[in-house]
Amino acid sequence: MSLLNKASLIQIPSGYKDGTLYSAKPTNGDGDFTFSRGSNLAATRVNSEGLIEKGRENLLLQSNSFDTTWVNNSSSETSGQEDKDGGTDAWLLNSTGSFGSITQSFTAINGVSTLSIYAKAGTNNWLLLRMNATSDARAWFDLENGVLGSTDGSTIESKIEAVGTDGWYRCSITGNTSSFSQVLIYPTNANFVVGTSGTIYIQDAQLEVGLVSTDVITTTTTTEQAGILEDMPRLDYSGGATCPSLILEPQRVNHLTQSEYYSGSTWIKQSGTTVTQNTTDTLSPEGKYNASKVTSNGSNGLFHTLVYSGGGANTKSIYLKGVSGGEVVYLKDPYQTVSTTTCTLTTEWQRFTLSETQTSSASLWIDDIPSGGIYMWGAMLESSASYVSSYIPTYGSSVTRSADSCVKTGISSLIGQTEGVLFVEASTLENGANNRITISDNTINNRVSIEWDIDADTIKGFIGVGGNVETTSHDQTNQNKIALLYTTSVAKLFINGSLINTDSTSIPTMSGMNRIDFSNYGGSVPFFGNAKQVIYFPTALTDDECIALTTI
């Protein structure tokens, strides 16, 4: 019989939805964990393809119903037209007078965003997309020849990409705008003009924050999201892992207001430094053409301006890649250089970090950029942080990712009150930072707790307020397999295939345990790290079974 048949709860991260982490056992859902983060779309993960995955949102309503929320300006629209996929979901947009267009208004956006739509020539051969803001961003697209026309205003980039073979294109404009609150779509008949009559075909409008357009998210009466949602558990494949782990992190802030857009004024370019935004030389760690190529004279660089005042622990990080490999640049701070990270680049993306404690304000500098250039993406500066956390994208303001929380309550029927085994395979984010995974009734008296102690290399097991087993020789940031066995007379701690410690003198009798938390009882000491397995057995196992369970 498989050892796992004896388990009453098996959590091996695999299935999830927004707000829920599914357990493999029980199979009826009684063991599924409640998950929350509630930080909008600030969280990211490394997915099974090794790419950084973000949360996404289409900020437009009725993205393919242009006769609803959209407003006509000397225009009309007709549905049921042949679409890019051979169906009938496209629309004929007809300009019936000067400045003929359709428009949609929304809550103002400040920063980098991208507007996109599928379009095809009708009686007119040109499309104008306009982002109406303090300084407009506008771009013209030649739908007959599939080439870009003019741009103006606060436009960062425009793109036109063929879709299929029937004359359809996806057209997009990216702008760095202030008080951007309206999009406009115009059929036009020439470059850099606003037409007075004529038609084009359109389909699937999308507006999203960021430097590039992503896969279409269809909306109706509300905006819609995709990717990593605000309360979605993150099953992370960092380091080339073939099986994911549940990543749980504390609240963090990326104080850098533009983590990917280096061409704007937020990033200061020293003499001789140039930035090619959204270079097509290489895909970013996200798998999109939204990285930058930065060149300089071999002694200068660029840096993000002042991001927060005051001192304290902080961690700076950025993804870098060499053009040919072997380039050396330096990660430091222009306001207070306490230490420097020497970054030797390869032709693969690497994340470089600099953690330091400062007595003054903090910022980020990438120095000694060679004339041949380097590639950059995903910059961060985290305050109150002695180690780097997962990437938090920003496009015009600092962004906070709230702490992850994971718990399962109401499972007294799955828990052995007088005996059992709690098994975890997990690593913490920092060695010596206080982390807990606990079965309890939410009090200290009735708890079975695996504890990564504030003392480095120390792992403990606590049974109620009496039983205590521990070790001081295991790095907490390693993926350790830990089993804590308890009965009314003994507690035993097993780690990585060995019996580490036994306590048979002070084991209390417990009752009422009805929950398992990725924290201590009461939730004040959360677990932050990567959990590959959490399994609970409602009866005590033999020593040999615990050794087999924890063998690496």
Image: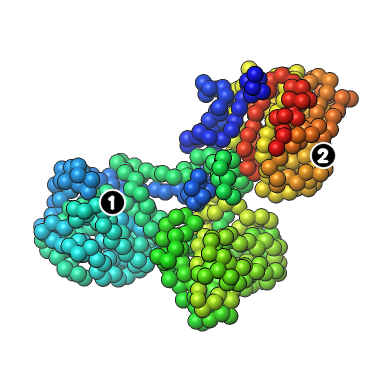
Q: Residue 462, located in which quarter of the rendered image?
A: top right
Q: Quadrant of residue 302?
A: bottom right
Query: Could you tell me the amino acid type at mark 1?
Result: Ala
Which residue is identified by label 2?
Answer: 471
Residue pictured at 18% horizontal, 42% vertical: 88
Could you tell me which quadrant the N terminus lies in?
top right
Q: For this view, does 321 lie left or right of residue 415?
A: left
Is residue 378 visible in the rendered image? The answer is: yes
Percent position of residue 456, x then y: 78, 48
Rendered residue at 50%/62% (across/down): 377
Q: Is residue 76 left or right of residue 284?
A: left
For marks 1 and 2, give the CA distance.
58 Å
**Label 2: element kind:** strand
Look at 67% across and 61% down and name the residue there: 355
Q: How is the image coloured?
A: rainbow
Q: Indicate the amino acid at tag 2.
A: Thr
Q: Position of residue 145 (x, y in %)?
A: 20, 64
Q: Earlier in the sequence, mark 1 or mark 2?
A: 1
- Note whether 305 is above or below 199 in the view shown: below
Residue that label 1 marks: 205
